Amino acid sequence: MEKLKIAGGYPLKGTVRISGAKNSAVALIPATILADSPVTIEGLPDISDVHILRGLMEEIGGTAKFSNNEMTVDPSSMISMPLPNGKVKKLRASYYLMGAMLGRFKKAVIGLPGGCYLGPRPIDQHIKGFEALGASVTNEQGAIYLRAEELRGARIYLDVVSVGATINIMLAAVRAKGRTVIENAAKEPEIIDVATLLTNMGAKIKGAGTDVIRIDGVDSLHGCKHTIIPDRIEAGTYMILAAAVGEGILIDNVIPQHLESLIAKLKEMGVEVKARDEQVYVGPADQYKSVDIKTLVYPGFPTDLQQPFTSLLTRAEGSSVVTDTIYGARFKHIDELRRMNANIKVEGRSAIITGCGQLQGAKVKASDLRAGAALVIAGLMAEGITEITGLEHIDRGYSHLVEKLNGLGATAWREELSQEEQEQMKNA
Ligand code: EPU
């Protein structure tokens, strides 16, 4: 087990290249199950979630090769192998195996997903969709059993706008008989990316990116080549980092339209932001003004950037309020930021941040992926050395983080935990 050490307090500059989108990747890879010949996905991020899913593609009888950020999955010899335990518990997105395996084999057994703890994360809307398509769904000892004689298109209204449920229902519906209509669908760019892959595989999908998606089922899908979209959350993280400690940072391989809410908030704070075709330049601010943030479904301010933004707000004059309307308990980073001298209190679904002047380096723990990103930014802002444990969370979503930070002039490195520290982690 390792920790990340950051010598903070120094300005960064240069160019950072953004990797492919994690939250697309984790759906695109399971989507390959639905084809009957090899699918190649280009530009995948080199993160643990991608490697775990590659292993799962092989566990169910396929072949999956990953090199140079490209994965080719041959799904032709896959079978509906039950996956009640093991790797599926390591990531949230293993729920996409339910939709994809149900769509192809009309049956699946998948353990309830793991991933970051952000408060309760039900999958009732996924199940509502599978049942509407004709599947029976039962939960037996922590695994979901799905079975259908036949999947038939249906009209499905999502009671909660959910990225996962929208994609999962698309996966199950593309090979169903007849038309499926998903109403109150999520509109995130990752949904369009998955619909694009499925369309290239021969699926008939209209309306992805709007709140009504229409799918006309087809009998079979074929292989193809697909290039993933850039990761808007990784890009947003580096933009926030640039605003916090940058002396001019160019973020390359971005779709700026995916980040309009963040760009607006950075500008409101007084940060210089210039968006170009596939790049965003972020300069420092003369004076950091406090701003309030409320997370919303896309195109609102993303919940996934709420935690990193909180670190930046410790630099602002006055008080800022960050309210998370998506996940009411996504505040585990706050205690750690307090260890670093941040002045923050949590009231219900909101964090109230009062500018604290200077953060101080400390020993902190990443409790989830974006909490980890928040602590990395805080570590770069802080005086002295910050030590971050819980790197398994950060490794799930940030490709080559240390290399990218050091490429901007940071002093960050990974170190093996001592025996004593490992014992402390086990007992924590
Ligand atoms: N919800 C339900 N029932 C459902 C599904 C969702 O009540 O069946 C609720 C959730 O509890 C939550 C809200 O709806 O309050 C949104 O959940 P959603 O299903 O959209 O979340 P998700 O698909 O599980 C994805 C991302 C998350 C991101 C959210 C919101 C993936 C693999 N994960 O999760 O990403 O926070 O959308 O944008 O795509 C991250 O990258 O750090 C991350 C957690």
Image: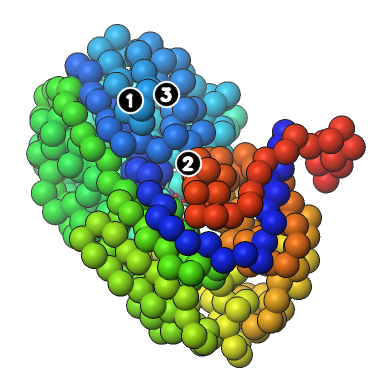
Vertical side of 82 occupied by 160: above or below? below
**Label 2 close to label 1 by CB (< 8 Å):** no
Mark drawn on residue 328? none
Position in image of residue 350 (x %, y %): 58, 76
Q: Let me know if residue 244 appears in the view.
A: yes
Q: What residue type is labelled 2?
A: Ser
Position in image of residue 208 (x %, y %): 18, 52
**Label 3 close to label 2 by CB (< 8 Å):** no
Gap between marks 2 and 1, in whole Å? 16 Å
Q: Name the residue under label 3.
A: 54
Q: Nearer the viewer, residue 411 or 307?
A: 411
Earlier in the chain: of badge 3 and badge 2, it is 3
Classify the position of the N terminus by image quarter.
top right
Farthest residue in the bottom direction? 318
Q: Name the residue under label 1.
A: 71
Determine crowd level at label 3: few under 14, some 14-19, many 20+ residues with C-alpha closer than 10 A: many
**Which of the two discs, 1 and 3, sits closer to the camera?**
1
The residue sitting at 62% across, 64% down in the picture is 10
**Label 1 close to label 3 by CB (< 8 Å):** yes
Q: Does the residue labelled 2 lie within 8 Å of ligand 1?
A: no
Q: Which amino acid does label 3 sit on?
A: Arg
Q: Nearer the viewer, residue 176 or 330?
A: 330
The residue sitting at 59% across, 30% down in the picture is 141
Gap between marks 1 and 3, in whole Å? 8 Å
Q: Mark 2 points at which residue?
A: 399
Q: Which amino acid does label 1 sit on?
A: Met
**Which of the two discs, 3 and 2, sits closer to the camera?**
2
Position in image of residue 104 (x %, y %): 26, 23
